[in-house]
């Protein structure tokens, strides 16, 4: 520990001597103001120095006397960016490892990315954080993910500064900075950077895109959404654009919306530069391309020979393209995953289908991205548009289990579905009837030449992303390759560099944290093709897996359990229970040769450096729990409440603002009035086709339907329809906990009389839905039982009152001790 303290002190002095003066220099530097037009005229424009945003109002430059005839008007000059500042199109796909795109040696055609690579530069050592929300927070703030509250995804937030899923006001996003300097700012696609408990119309909206500087938002909230019936918002309002549109798919709709936005902006203000942040759901699960794309890719037979040969093909392509250096070694295939030649015919058939549909989603997503890029060219703006296209916010996902799944919410909760059962969905794989994911073995192959996958921050299979940057007329070394080591936090300073806009010292009266990234613009010059990287150090951490890069070396902890076990395995003590490995990546691009035994002093030095960096960037406390963190209590409208009452019709309440019935006993009571002639319809539901529950009347008969992640359905039903008049319908469930996914006994009663009783062996473990909502009196998106009804299934009687009561399951002293231990590390204080 003495050595650690010594390193801390030395590095602290160095950081103070280097970083602080740089920050002060930024604060003191004034950019020359650029004005155009006649001062005080309606067409006058001006830049601002950018140190304090929004810029203070200028003094009135006219003359005011008693009458207008004796006065002189003066319009405030319109704020514009510095002369020549380019448009910015920032694109990032989802869950795509280094070996996926054709641009970086993959077999899946991605012509839009190829086009940009030919007109710009490919980067072969660019990195993410290994997980969705954290990468996106780093990308839009220019700061490390723990520095801005996103040590993990929003759904696993805990009450520590590095993990609370709150981007504080001292870390303004690139959207806010560019907006205040005259850009039109917009965000299309995935928003995984709003705390889950703030999704409702109750707000506040300061953590939504609009509150982070993006003037227009069209996209979905959370980690994923169904592409056929998405959980979609325009600004703060839920929208349902698929209604009445057979064949609708969000991937195309999002491109249409972005194109319409660009064309509308160009018509209204053609001279105004834009910053468009384009982040489609592809290719995060569910993999849901259109049938046309599935057929197009399936007809190419890219995956018929399996994942092992796929790796060899990708590796050969990478060497040919030069996107891996000479001498790179292909890391070995893990013993924990089967080799293709050991599989039977049914397994090969299913797994090939999984890869075909995933690849179709990749190609489809790239195609729609290409349409947006083409629109920029059609408007004549391509030559002054900086386009950054990042393939993936982390490595390829291993969240589909070793066998894949037709229902991804089941797989991420460690519910495996046998291959023979999956084959029943072969013909509808990727359709609205499935939310599929693929086998981990494909994921490992798509991360070629590296080890590991998404979630693993300690190895490049989880963090190495293919990226291209195009800026016609400014990047002269077109088609070039850049090998400098960089990270997501380097994108914001790159954008600020090329636009001539400084990082602000203060935003809305709040002093700003320094930007932690470095500009990559130096790599644009052909003379700097082989220049040393300006990023010398970078830490990585996710779920306790950690690494530290410094000056060509990286020390890393191998995962004690693979990510596809989804946190169900016992983990070691997080601080000292991990082994470390050492790699000289300046000579060993793929992290294939562990040098820890040869250079123990180097490894120790880097381990100590990790502690220094982790302290600096809010990484502590380390936590390797996964499922438990999903259950950790968070601030919300439901926090501490056990009774919830609703009346009338209400739809669209997000899961995070609804009563959470998982892992506990509960009751749902509906007081209704049935008119003459009877009634039917939904009384209360949460979730839909792929998991959830519904209490409703079907042809007048009370029904409670429980959909266990589309794997099993449990049903309680009365044999008699309700007669006209007032009635009380009660569903009461006694949970058999503690623990995840235990069973229980449900009783359906009408007017105090039991009409159905059933004991079920298990329930949904930790996550009922991601992209469905809590509805009363109707049902939106998809229903919990397609055989019974189709949304919106409005209740045709009168729903006087609906009450949900949550009741902790009775526990023995031993049960209570076990439950307390399960959540001990992640439970937040109640103050």
Image: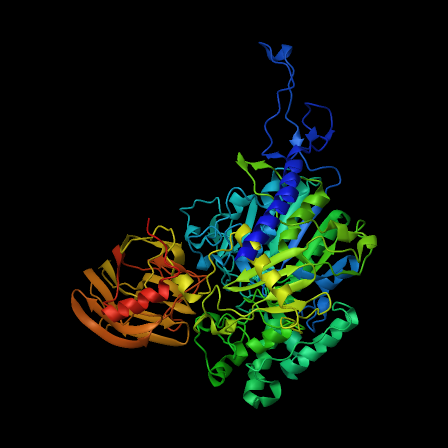
| Total residue callouts | 0
- Relative depth, front residue between 34 and 814: 814
- In the rendered structure, the answer to whether residue 771 lies left or right of residue 66 reads left
- Relative depth, front residue between 738 and 794: 738
The percent position of residue 792, horizontal first and vertical second, equals: 39, 61
Residue 443 occupies quadrant? bottom right
- In the rendered structure, the answer to whether residue 131 lies left or right of residue 675 reads right
- Relative depth, front residue between 697 and 743: 743
The percent position of residue 401, horizontal first and vertical second, equals: 50, 76
- Relative depth, front residue between 349 and 624: 624
- In the rendered structure, the answer to whether residue 585 lies left or right of residue 472 reads left
Looking at the image, the residue that sits furthest to the left is 752
Residue at the spot x=70%, y=74% of the render?
107
Residue 722 occupies quadrant? bottom left
The percent position of residue 589, horizontal first and vertical second, equals: 70, 68
Q: Which colour scheme is used?
A: rainbow
Residue at the spot x=61%, y=43% of the render?
16
The answer, for residue 281, to whether it is visible in the render is yes
Residue 611 occupies quadrant? bottom right
Residue at the spot x=55%, y=49% of the render?
217
The answer, for residue 301, to whether it is visible in the render is no
The percent position of residue 418, horizontal first and vertical second, equals: 47, 83
């Amino acid at each position: 520990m003495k050595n650690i303290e010594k390193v801390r002190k030395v590095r602290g002095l160095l950081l103070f001597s280097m970083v602080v003066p740089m920050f002060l220099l930024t604060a003191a530097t004034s950019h020359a103001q650029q004005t155009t037009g006649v001062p005080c005229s309606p067409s006058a424009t001006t830049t601002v120095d950018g140190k304090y945003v929004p810029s203070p109002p200028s003094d009135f430059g006219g003359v005011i006397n008693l009458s207008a005839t004796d006065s002189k008007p003066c319009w405030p000059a319109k704020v514009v960016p510095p002369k020549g500042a380019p448009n910015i199109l920032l694109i990032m796909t989802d869950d795509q490892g280094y070996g996926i795109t054709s641009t970086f040696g993959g077999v899946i055609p991605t012509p839009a990315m190829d086009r940009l690579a030919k007109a710009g530069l490919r980067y072969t050592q660019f990195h993410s954080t290994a997980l969705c929300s954290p990468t996106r927070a780093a990308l839009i703030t220019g700061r490390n993910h723990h520095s801005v509250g996103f040590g993990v995804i929003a759904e696993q937030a805990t009450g520590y500064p590095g993990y609370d899923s709150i981007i504080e006001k001292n870390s303004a996003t690139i959207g806010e900075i560019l907006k205040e300097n005259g850009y039109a700012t917009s965000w299309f696609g995935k928003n995984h950077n709003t705390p889950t408990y703030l999704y409702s119309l109750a707000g506040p909206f300061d953590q939504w895109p609009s509150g982070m500087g993006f003037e227009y938002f069209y996209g979905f909230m959370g980690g994923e959404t169904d592409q056929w019936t998405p959980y979609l918002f325009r600004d703060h309002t839920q929208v349902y654009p698929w209604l009445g549109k057979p064949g609708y798919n969000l991937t195309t709709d999002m491109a249409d919306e972005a194109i319409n936005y660009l064309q509308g902006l160009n018509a209204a203000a053609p001279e105004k530069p834009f910053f468009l942040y384009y982040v489609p759901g592809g290719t995060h699960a569910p993999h849901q391309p259109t049938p046309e794309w599935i057929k197009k890719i399936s007809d190419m037979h890219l995956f018929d020979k399996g994942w092992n040969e796929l790796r060899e093909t990708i590796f050969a392509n990478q060497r040919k393209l030069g996107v891996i250096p000479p001498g790179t070694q292909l890391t070995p295939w893990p013993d924990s995953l089967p080799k293709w030649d050991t599989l039977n015919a049914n397994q090969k058939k299913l797994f090939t289908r999984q890869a075909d549909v995933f690849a179709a989603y990749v190609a489809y997503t790239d195609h729609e991205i290409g349409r947006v890029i083409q629109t920029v060219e059609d408007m004549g703006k391509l030559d002054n548009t900086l386009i950054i296209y990042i393939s993936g916010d982390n490595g390829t996902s291993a969240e589909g289990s070793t066998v894949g799944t037709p229902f991804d919410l089941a797989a991420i909760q460690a519910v495996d579905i046998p291959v023979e059962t999956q084959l029943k969905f072969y013909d509808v794989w990727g359709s609205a009837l499935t939310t599929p994911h693929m086998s981990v073995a494909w994921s490992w192959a798509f991360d070629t030449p590296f080890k590991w996958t998404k979630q693993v921050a300690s190895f490049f299979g989880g963090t190495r992303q293919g990226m291209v940057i195009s800026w016609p007329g400014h990047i002269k070394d077109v088609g070039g390759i850049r090998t400098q080591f960089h990270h997501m936090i380097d994108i914001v300073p790159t954008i600020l560099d090329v636009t001539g806009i400084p990082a602000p010292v203060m935003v809305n009266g709040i002093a700003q944290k320094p930007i932690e990234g470095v500009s990559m613009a130096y790599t644009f010059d052909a003379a700097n093709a082989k220049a040393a990287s300006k990023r010398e150090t970078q830490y990585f951490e996710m779920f306790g897996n950690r690494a530290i890069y410094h000056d060509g070396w990286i020390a890393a902890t191998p995962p004690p359990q693979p990510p596809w076990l989804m946190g169900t395995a016992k983990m070691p003590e997080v601080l000292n229970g991990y082994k470390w490995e050492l790699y000289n990546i300046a000579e060993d691009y793929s992290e294939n040769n562990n040098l820890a035994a040869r250079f123990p002093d180097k490894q120790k030095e880097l381990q100590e450096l990790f502690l220094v960096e982790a302290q600096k960037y809010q990484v502590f406390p380390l936590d390797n729990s996964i499922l438990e963190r999903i259950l950790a209590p968070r601030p919300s409208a439901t926090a501490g409440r056990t009774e919830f009452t609703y009346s009338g019709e209400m739809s669209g309440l997000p899961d995070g603002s609804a009563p959470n019935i998982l892992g506990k006993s509960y009751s749902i009571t509906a007081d209704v009035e049935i008119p003459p002639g009877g009634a039917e319809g939904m009384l209360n539901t949460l979730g839909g086709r792929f998991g959830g529950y519904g209490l409703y009347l079907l042809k007048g008969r009370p029904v409670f339907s429980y959909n266990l992640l589309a794997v099993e359905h449990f049903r309680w039903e009365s044999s008699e329809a309700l007669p006209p008049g007032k009635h009380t319908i009660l569903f009461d469930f006694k949970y058999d906990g503690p623990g995840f996914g235990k069973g229980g006994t449900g009783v359906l009663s009408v007017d105090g009389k039991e009409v159905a009783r059933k004991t079920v062996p298990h329930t949904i473990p930790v996550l009922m839905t991601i992209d469905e909502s809590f509805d009363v009196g109707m049902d939106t998106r998809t229903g919990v039982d397609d055989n019974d009804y189709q949304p919106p299934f409005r209740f045709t009687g009168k729903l006087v009152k609906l009450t949900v009561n949550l009741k902790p399951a009775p526990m023995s002293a031993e049960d209570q001790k076990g439950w307390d231990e399960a959540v001990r590390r992640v439970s937040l204080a109640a103050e």
